[in-house]
Image: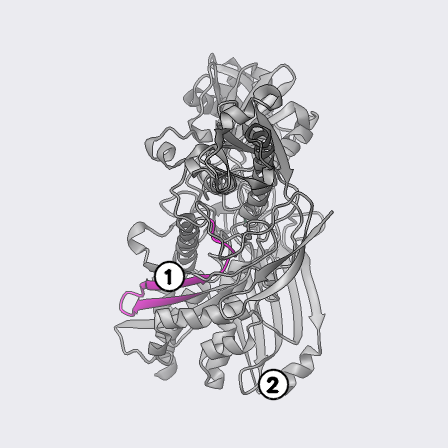
Amino acid sequence: MAKKTRVTLGFPGHFREVAVSIPEGEPAPWGFDADLKVVGKRVPRVDGPDKASGRARYTFDLKLPGMLHAAVLRCPHPHARLKRIDTAKAEAHPEVRAVLILEEREYRFAGAEVAAVAATTLAAALEALRLIEIEYEPLPFVTDPEAARRPDAPSVRPDGNVAVSAEKRRGNVEKAFREADATEEVTICTPVALHTCLEGHGSLARWEGDRVTVWDSTQAVFDVRDSLARALKLPPEKVRVIKDHAGGGFGSKLQMWPHTPIAARLAKLAGAPVRLLLSRREDFLCTGNRHSSVQTVKLAAKRDGTFTALSWRSYGTGGVEGGAQTSGIIEGMYDIPSLEVREEDVFTHAGPACPMRAPGHVQGAVALEAAIDTLSEKLGLDPLEVRLKNDKSAIRRAELRLGAERIGWGRRRPSGSDRGPLKRGLGVAGTTWDGSGLPGPEVEIVIGAGGEVEALCGTQDIGTGTRTILAQVVAEELGLTADQVTVRLGDSYFPYSMLSGGSLTAACVTPAARAASAKARTALLKLAAGRLGADAAELETSGKEIRARGSDRKISWASALREAPGGRLSVRAERQGNFEGYETGAAGCQFAEVEVDIETGKVRVVRVVAVHDSGRILNPLLWESQVNGGVIQGISFALLEERIIDHRFGKVLSADMETYKVLGALEVPEIEVVPFPVAAGFNNTQVVGIGEPAIIPTAAAVANAVANALGVRICDLPITPDRVLNALESIAKGRG
Ligand code: MOS
């Protein structure tokens, strides 16, 4: 039986009540004016002390008795066939316990796995790799996406190096362009970027009989379990995957990579646990990247700035695998009556792409927002006004107004009019993402005989604070403080949850936690009702005591639990489907102020204002941390990050943290994080994810600010000093 209830949706000035059906047993959403004690508070991370003191165990910290260390022999060529391999000398090494030759005989990127060894020390394993005699037959290769597109290019995949990934048309685009008052076209190039997690990829495998346990640095314990079961030809219940703490993932740990089954197979061969941790270099070459893009975006508008048509042509490469779409951002942002999209994936002999924090949207935002600024200037209109006119989200329009006030948009000068030598500029961009969650995940609440509370869920905390928000939600429902709840997660033996990706986790697991806690609460009150001689409906609980409302009769949880079978409680609940559609996704916008030194070409981001909606904010400390992280990673992408390949040799030149540059602490600007509270009544905690929406607009806003400062657009990211100086020189020549 579903019950009807009314919930409030909207944002200040635009609240409205809607009726929603709540499934039986499911708690109704908390009102946005509810007096919550733990949820919405700046509760420090429950695992903060463990992390700060070094007690927290990451996969890279784990050691087991008798554990062996593994290393992988990787193909040095971008494309080659195995001609001969002889592992006899490696096998004879006194410290080597297992040698594995992988089945694959053709390697399609430098870094592909060829063989692996396990030895008593890592040094011995690396030494044994050098004892493997190997001959390759080098094959024709192509790592440059431009070259890979040519018909005579060396073949990367049997079905061709180019695949159309998106094609879409609506309206009469040609007519709309002909009849527009103004059109502008920009071509924006973005590089391959790398996830650069603090903790890299690694697995530790241990067999007990025909069962294997793998500790893996992953965003997806259940997906790794299933993939590993397939790879080892085992039923999934014989595979257990554990991930306690992780130093980030950003999308690079959503899938199982080859090192995981390699560790498991070596452990089986050696009859001992095997730990295989990838080096930074291996991580950079082999475990995914953000695909590059070449986006040609043409936008048409009426004189007043109303968009009439958009043409989006894009291609990009993710190496041997992975899509390269960028146009996904359009529909959540602007109303455009006539649209054509054509996108292609280009395959090259380089390490594979995989999702990276808001895949495609980060790149797409740079192109879309560049086209809007360019067209606005042509029409002589304020680019902010043009956005306000076309933005389809009322939430984001309100956020744009608020952000403009905070950054001081009124100070923005016409592009290129700051005389320098330190030229200032302002830019803006929007974000959209749907992290409203999915049904399916389960949480189990266990209340032990002494009243101790545990919440169990197979979800994983990838550093975002999932443990803490789960503790808060359970505590809120049970009348406790967050530190009275022990959250156990990151284990495929716990109740099912999905991967931690797509900014879905908070909105997936907290509703299940709340529903399970509500069930536990009901069960506790029922137990107490008999003892107190009261109706369960008159009882309330806080501080592990149950009392009748308006009376001083009370009993402790521990004594109420004596009535329970086994003296304890254990209940589970599953995340239900969303009650009501959430119209816009997580809307937001960011404003950037930059200063460009026209003598050195260096860009400094001075200030960023980030205005974001993500439904209810469970914990402002963690939420701000996500937004800060998104902004920092976005600036890094705009100004520094780039995987560089020498296409003559197909060799990655930036496979370490010295040559692959990321933003340093001293380059982080002042970031003003502005929560924009929106009531969203679609699940019982009313949460929407914030991890990905927070990075989407940053590089776009920075690039627009640089264009505003200089009066010329730098169309290639990252915006490095040499590109700034070249752009300035081109204007000077144009004038000369
Ligand atoms: Mo994210 S790219 O879904 O970790």
The yes-or-no answer for disc 1 within 8 Å of ligand 1 is no
Q: Are marks 2 and 1 in contact (CB under 8 Å)?
A: no
Examine the rendered structure and indicate whether residue 327 appears above or below residue 571: below
Examine the rendered structure and indicate whether residue 147 appears above or below residue 184: above
The answer to which image quadrant residue 84 occupies is: top right
Per the image, the residue denoted by label 1 is 720
Main SS of the magenta part reads strand
Residue 647: x %, y % from top left: 50, 51
Could you say which is closer to the camera, residue 550 or residue 667? 550
Could you say which is closer to the camera, residue 502 or residue 641? 502
Which badge, 2 or 1, is on the more N-terminal residue? Answer: 2
Q: Amino acid at mark 2?
A: Ala
Residue at 38%, 64% (x, y): give it.
609
Please tell me the numbered disc located at residue 712.
none
Q: Tell me if 408 is positioned left or right of 125 in this view.
A: left
Residue 271: x %, y % from top left: 57, 14
Instruction: Note whether residue 86 is visible.
Output: no
Q: Tell me if 540 is positioned left or right of 713 in this view.
A: right
Q: Which residues are magenta?
A: 590-618
Q: Amino acid at mark 1?
A: Thr
Q: Is residue 703 magenta?
A: no
Residue at 39%, 44% (x, y): give it.
43
